[in-house]
Image (cartoon, rainbow, N blue to C red):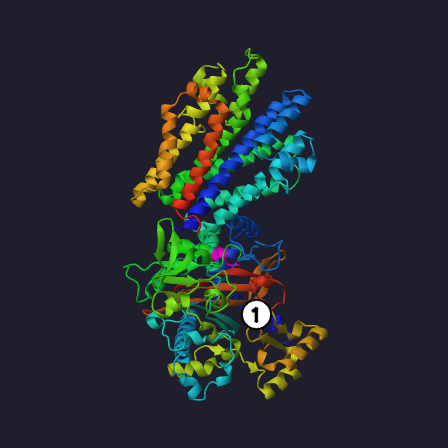
Amino acid sequence: MKKPLSASYDEMLDADGSVRSAYAGYCQWHDEQPADLLRRKGSEAEAFFRRTGITFNVYGNEDAEERLIPFDMVPRIITAQQWRKLSRGIEQRVRALNAFLHDLYHRQEIVRSGRLPARLLKNNVAFLPEMVGFTPPGGVYTHIVGIDLVRTGEDDFMVLEDNARTPSGVSYMLENRETMMAMFPELFTRVRVREVSDYPRRLARSLAACAPPACDRKTPLVAVLTPGIYNSAYFEHAFLADQMGAELVDGSDLRAENGRIAMRTTRGYEPIDVLYRRVDDEYLDPLMFNPQSMLGVSGIMDVYRAGGITIANAPGTGISDDKAIYSFMPEIVEFYTGEKPILQNVPTWRCSEPESLQYVLDNLAELVVKEVHGSGGYGMLIGPTSSKKELAVFEAKLRARPENYIAQPTLALSTVPILTKAGLAPRHVDLRPFVLVSPNGIDITPGGLTRVALKKGSLVVNSSQGGGTKDSWVLDD
Amino acid sequence: MLGRSANGIFWLFRYLERAENVSRLIEAGFRMALTRSASDAVDEWRSLIVTLGLRQAFEARYGTDYTGPHVFNFILRDKDNPGSILAITEAARTNARMVRGGITREVWESVNDGWMQLREALARPVTETRLGAVLDLVRRQATQVRGAMEGTMLRNEIYNFARIGSFIERADNTARILDVKYYVLLPSVSYVGSSLDNVQWENVLRSVAGERAYRWLNAGRMDPRGIAEFLILDERFPRSLAFCYSKLRSNLASLAREYGSEVKSHEMLGDAACQFHTTTIESIFEQGLHEFIGKFIRANTALALQIQRDYRFTE
């Protein structure tokens, strides 16, 4: 754990340095290529991204307003067999998440049974009282989920985080594949990789299957709600709307009218059936939540509860990916599915519990500490790479508000090589597969977003903190 | 489509059209300045600033120092000029981002690519040596976007709003050029058809890329009335007022067909477009070229506003 890199599982090479079966086809191709081809293609890819406008806005950094997420040309490869197991685990987990949400906003059996402490819900801003007693159309809470997985060994995949609010990054999954296919078409004739490009079509179908009671169209009208062009994921919002053939709307386009939410078109106001919103709960309805919000629509919550619109994901899903709830996921999966969880959690200490807090404080330099409500890699401590001063600052924070933190061991995340000036070099990765939920079932796109820490030894893969991405391949049988 | 998207697409194409026309104006001014004495060159540059309505802003920055590099850098890239070519190209690109879903990848990429190149080219002050290449870049972008649109966009409402934006802007720009240069075209006591007059007339044509077409149609004879007629009434010339209005009419008509109804702007346009068929250049000169153009610019602006209202561009 002290030396994560050398102790890590490398997905391409085994301990003897021979190529693992997943990468056999790729490596054979790779070895046949002229030495500088990949690097040359790398700069081609960057120009391609700039031109197509795939950019990522970083808040509070004006110079880099439209920064590219670095793209690495070496794919991350998962075998068909590994994927089958992962899919089963993901499906089970997502099923449990939806059942859990339904229960939380209805009878709260899990609390009554004593498996989940009631205090986790009390005063938790992610729990929305407005959702109590209401069942969303089709019974679906999380229409789109991104499950963050990390790997520590051949068969050891663990869930690091469940993103059940508005997971982003799917456009990178799609564009990374497009780029790879444009750069190395012959590679795809040699290695059979499962398709990801129909994700937008599947998303559209999945959303359309959740039309609200008020919908009177044969094909429900789907719109994507974006906070606007200055949002970091704006490219993705526009991209998905375009690919789905849906309207891309912002708060200024919408108003509540006759029990529906309608958008201002050139012909007048037209009601929307399903709103794929990329705006946080807090900003969704200025009447209910943040009155300052310019991003949402006044009255949407009333319309929603009266069956006038479907909101995807449902408001209040954030309670299920809360980091304090996360530590209970194994119990939650078992409670709702009656099965043992197929995917493991990362071992987690809840600092709200005095014994755990003591352990965390005693071992701070070895642990990763996260804020319960934080995201994007902000507000976290990585013990092994932190200075004495940083540790002391965090120790004070922990003592002041222990319930605000969880801690996890510093995992030896698996590595996949990236292309560096000195050739291939291993870097830590994670994986975010994208999962769609509709009344017709759970649909997992074979692939996902691989995020990679570009700095040697770094474990932070977040794009807001210098992470990059890779194309993620699931091999065909 | 969303009213906001219609607004975005309308302005995207207005900005692109404007950038192209302004670059042509600079080119004509530059050419004129090169062939004149120093003091006449200053007049030429000043007239360019006046045409663009930038006199106040320019003089706040440079006083009355109307030298070429000051003038064209002010128009191209000055931060004190919110209507600089750089600023409007950026605005065009922001609009394109906003309506990304309504335009094809080809159109988006040509807008984005053009903006990236121009931003680089205008990162430092432009010298007289580099001016030609920079102006060329602006025009090439406009041409490329237009080509991408022609070749890839569905002929639906989005396309119509794009075209309406282009032609409203183009008609406005041609009219403004005429408005500033109208005195050159008026018969005057000094009119002897001297070579200087010829150069001035040709320059008016050059500002709207019409010099070749005009020469071709008129076997090389330059006469001010003919030039005014060409720029106002000749429906064959793509930057004439008559041409722009005939296109506006067909684009608005196709919107009406698609929507199954006509709105107030159709009525306004019908009246305005009609005059190009019924009027003659003689009657325009009779009522006064300057007055005619002033009236046209006001009506054109009113039409644009009515279109924005009719199609709910904003709340």
What amino acid is found at the position of numbered circle 1 in the picture?
A: Asp
Which of B185 and B271 lies nearest the eye of the viewer?
B271
- Location of residue A342 in the rendering, given as x and y in whole percent from the top left corner: 43, 78
Question: What range of the chain is rendered magenta?
Answer: A231-236
Residue at the image position 48 percent from the left and 28 percent from the top: B293
For the point 62% across and 80% down, the residue is: A401
The correct choice, above or below, for A347 with respect to B220 in the image is below
Query: Is B6 displayed left or right of A440 in the figure?
Result: right
Q: Is residue B284 visible?
A: yes
Residue at 32% across / 69% down in the picture? A440
**Dot 1: chain letter:** A
The residue sitting at the top extreme is B192
Residue B162 pos. (x, y %): 42, 41
Residue A378 at x, y percent in the picture? 60, 68
Q: Residues within 10 Å of mark 1 (few under 14, many from 20)?
A: few
* Furthest residue in direction right, as rendered: A389
Q: Tell me if residue A122 comes above or below residue A141 in the rendering.
A: below
Q: Nearer the viewer, residue B123 or A179?
A: B123
Q: Which residue is mark 1?
A: A16
